[in-house]
Image: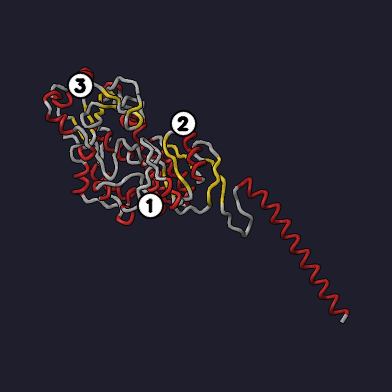
């Protein structure tokens, strides 16, 4: 009996020693987890700490199922990468936009946003409770401050993503890592990078006297515009177009830009080409073609007035989204067809299949390009 008791006692002491060692091991690994964002072996981490594209250290869930963005720029990025993780839109999609959006995502809720007029539906966002909110655009102090304020108000991590045209490849790679979509992000990033690198190389080799002078006609009258170096004209600047609008950038009623100009100013600039908002956006394309006041312009006389393609979103601006990548190919081909010699319909169809999960017909591609191609 004593021998039996001794065996039990030894077994109990051994069990206590093993349990103590395990607890000590977990404690030391727990300290490492806080610094590295990695979980102890055999355990699943609930959170990790990342550095966003503005250099902010943010704690986010390891597994992210729902994401909301503060503006359409970020929303479009999420939709193209992982539509099943999009929590909602920033406004009610119109019929033109819905046409190119997969049916199961057309009816996602309109949650508003923090852009232009602040329309964010705080109560509904909190009810849906996305694990992360994206703020995509500028990386300046104003944007950082807004991201911090939203995070403090909603108690949801706000992650900043750089919206610069030439950094869209990095934006995809960053978001792919955040959402666990690395392979698809790698593919989309490569497309963006190849497009940007090709355009940059060809424009760099282009003689200055070959560059085309362009006026960007915004608004319903065509008498609002943005100058070179504006976020809203990055595509034009990037493909080697000369923006004729010799005006300072300013904050307009719809957000940054849209400075008012007079027709006399446009006449004095006398551009080679005019780019107008699409008719579906309420642009002045048809007015510029038909109004006698515009007829003395070189661009009108030479039939070089074009509307920017739009669907599901604008290819040039407003919002300045990833659609600008196909915008680079379109505008480069429009201004310099001998340098950027694409089969534009095939190029557009390929882009929509890759980014929008949508197989365009030739007829749909032609419709998108109506009024947007040279003769």
How crowded pointer 1 is (Cα within 10 Å; few <14, some 14-19, many 20+) is rated as many
- Say what secondary structure mark 3 lies in: helix
Image location (x, y in percent) of residue 144: 49, 34
* Quarter occupied by the C terminus: top left
How crowded pointer 2 is (Cα within 10 Å; few <14, some 14-19, many 20+) is rated as few
The residue singled out by tag 2 in the image is 142
The residue singled out by tag 1 in the image is 83
- What residue is rendered at 13% in x and 24% in y? 295
How crowded pointer 3 is (Cα within 10 Å; few <14, some 14-19, many 20+) is rated as some
- What residue is rendered at 42% in x and 53% in y? 85
**Residue 202 appears in the rendering:** no
- Say what secondary structure mark 2 lies in: helix
How far separated are the C-alphas under marks 1 and 3?
A: 43 Å
Give the camera-side residue of 154 and 85: 154
Q: Is tag 1's residue or tag 3's residue first in the polypeptide sequence?
A: 1
- What residue is rendered at 35% in x and 24% in y? 250
Give the camera-side residue of 94 and 342: 94
Q: Is residue 325 left or right of residue 300?
A: right
Q: Is tag 2's residue or tag 1's residue first in the polypeptide sequence?
A: 1
């Amino acid at each position: 009996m004593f021998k039996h008791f001794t065996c039990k006692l030894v077994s109990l002491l051994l069990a206590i020693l093993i349990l103590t060692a395990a607890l000590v091991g977990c404690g030391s690994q727990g300290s490492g987890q806080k610094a590295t964002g990695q979980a102890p072996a055999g355990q699943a981490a609930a959170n990790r700490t990342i550095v966003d594209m503005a250099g902010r250290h943010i704690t986010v869930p390891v597994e992210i199922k729902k994401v909301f963005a503060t503006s359409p720029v970020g929303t479009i990025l999420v939709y193209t990468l992982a539509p099943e993780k999009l929590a909602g839109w920033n406004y009610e999609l119109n019929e033109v936009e819905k046409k190119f959006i997969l049916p199961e995502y057309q009816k996602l809720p309109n949650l508003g946003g923090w852009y232009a007029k602040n329309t964010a539906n705080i109560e509904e966002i909190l009810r849906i409770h996305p694990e992360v909110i994206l703020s995509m655009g500028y990386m300046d102090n104003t944007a950082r401050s807004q991201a911090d304020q939203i995070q403090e108000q909603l108690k949801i991590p706000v992650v900043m993503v750089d919206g610069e045209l030439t950094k869209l490849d990095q934006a995809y790679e960053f978001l792919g890592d955040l959402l666990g979509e690395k392979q698809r992000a790698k593919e989309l990033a490569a497309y963006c990078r190849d497009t940007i690198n090709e355009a940059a190389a060809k424009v760099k080799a282009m003689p200055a006297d070959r560059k085309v002078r362009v006026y960007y006609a915004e608004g319903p009258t065509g008498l609002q515009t943005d100058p070179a170096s504006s976020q809203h004209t990055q595509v034009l600047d990037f493909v080697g177009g000369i923006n004729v609008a010799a005006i300072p950038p300013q904050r307009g009623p719809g957000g940054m830009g849209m400075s008012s100009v007079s027709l006399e100013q446009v006449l004095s600039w006398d551009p080679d080409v005019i780019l107008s908002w699409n008719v579906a956006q309420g642009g002045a394309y048809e007015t510029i073609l038909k109004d006698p006041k515009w007829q003395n312009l070189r661009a009108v006389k030479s039939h070089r007035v074009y509307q920017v393609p739009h669907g599901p979103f604008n290819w040039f601006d407003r919002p300045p989204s990833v659609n600008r990548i196909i915008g680079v190919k379109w505008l480069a081909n429009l201004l310099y067809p001998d340098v950027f010699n694409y089969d534009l319909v095939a190029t557009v169809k390929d882009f929509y299949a890759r980014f929008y999960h949508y197989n365009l017909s030739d007829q749909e591609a032609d419709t998108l390009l109506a009024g947007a191609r040279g003769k």
